[in-house]
Amino acid sequence: MSRHQGSSGKGKTSGRGQDKSSSNGGGRSHDNSKGHSYSRGNAPMRKVTKDISKPDVAKKPTSKKSTSDDIRLNKYIANSGVCSRRDADMHISTGSVTVNGKVVTEMGYKVKLDDDVRFDGARINPEKKAYVLLNKPKGFASTTSEGKGRTVMDLVANATTSRIKPIGRLGRNSLGLILFTNDEALVKKFTNSKHGIPRLFQVELDKNLKFEDFKKIQEGLKIEGKLVTVEEISFIEGEPKNKIGLKIKNTGNTVIRSIFGHLKYEIEKLDCVAIAGLTKKDIPRGHWKHLTEQEVNNLKMLS
């Protein structure tokens, strides 16, 4: 039944506090002809009327939007795919989780998306994994730092909402492929000093490369007391001898500049044309693409 059905629309007068003649005892008198005096709490209730033509409308609670980008630690862990939120609470309580290098056991602890959160020592990330391959043009620095002019981050700004970063670097005036990801395991594979991921460069020198220098690079040479080696070196078929193919596993290209600088050559053009099995095919200069699932799996299977 509706709250308004059967209502008379009038309030009911209380029977309490009815007018009674007061005695003249105690030396005080009450003139009932002028008004009534009631003890506290016994005054008659006022009539209350209700307009049933206007239904009650519940006020909507006002919700305050949080401006904070903090997220509960258990949710952060669950979003990373490690375990459920309930299991995350258990792991937190046992000290298996660190935030920015400190063990956190507090339930309800909040973190920011860019905090260093580790589960059993391995860094985790609640964002969706993204893998973006860019064909870098000249004039863009390979850095995530601001205040460096135009950077590769400007070129991939609309690629994904995940916070990706470049693996390795190319010089501002170097060209070619750079892989971006937020997959820490893949980053570690690329930067592993013992294994790494092979990258193929085309190098154009200011003069033809002498065969004896070719052999020195092929066999490895000492630069400032340190042995520097490459995976492969070759002349490019059908091209002048100043154009060289060079495969390395270093994440930067400074090693290439060090090699040719040591041998008194100037590099006029440096172009990364392949990363593992990934090539520039169908990626115009200055454009990017998302890796396919198969391409990602191929990278992960590299030893």
Image (cartoon, rainbow, N blue to C red):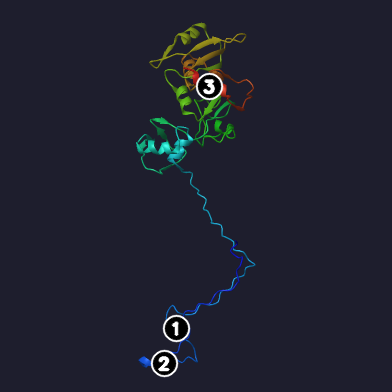
Which quadrant of the structure image shows residue 280? Answer: top right
Q: Position of residue 302 (x, y in %)?
A: 49, 18
**Residue 220 image-quadrant placement:** top left
Do the residues under discs 1 and 2 have CB atoms within 8 angstroms? no
Q: Amino acid at mark 3?
A: Asn
* Residue identified by numbered label 3: 297
Amino acid carrying mark 2 in the image: Ser
Residue ID at (40%, 39%): 89
Residue 136: horizontal and vertical position, in percent? 58, 26
> Mark 1: few, some, or many residues within 10 Å (few <14, many ≥20)?
few
Placement of the N terminus among the 4 image quadrants: bottom right
**Of the pair 17 and 241, the residue shown nearer to us:** 17
Any part of residue 175 in sight: no
**Mark number for residue 29?**
2
- Disc number placed over residue 38 in the picture, else none: 1
Q: Is any atom of residue 160 visible in this view? A: yes
| 2 vs 3, front mark | 2
Q: Are marks 2 and 3 in contact (CB under 8 Å)?
A: no
In-front residue for pair 214/34: 34
Considering depth in this image, is 59 or 207 the residue closer to the camera?
A: 59
Question: In front here: 83 or 293?
Answer: 83
Tell me the SS state at disc 1: loop
At x 45%, y 8%, the residue is 219
Query: Mark 2 Cα within 10 Å, few/some/many (few <14, many 20+)?
Result: few
> Which badge, 3 or 1, comes first in the chain's sequence?
1
Q: Residue at x 48, y 46 (%)?
A: 68
Q: Which mark is residue 109?
A: none
Q: Real-space Cα distance between discs 1 and 2?
A: 13 Å
Mark sitting earlier along the chain (1/2): 2
* Camera-side mark, 3 or 1: 1
Q: Position of residue 261 (x, y in %)?
A: 48, 17
Structural crowding at the residue carrying mark 3, measured as other residues with C-alpha within 10 Å and reported as few (<14), some (14–19) or many (≥20):
few
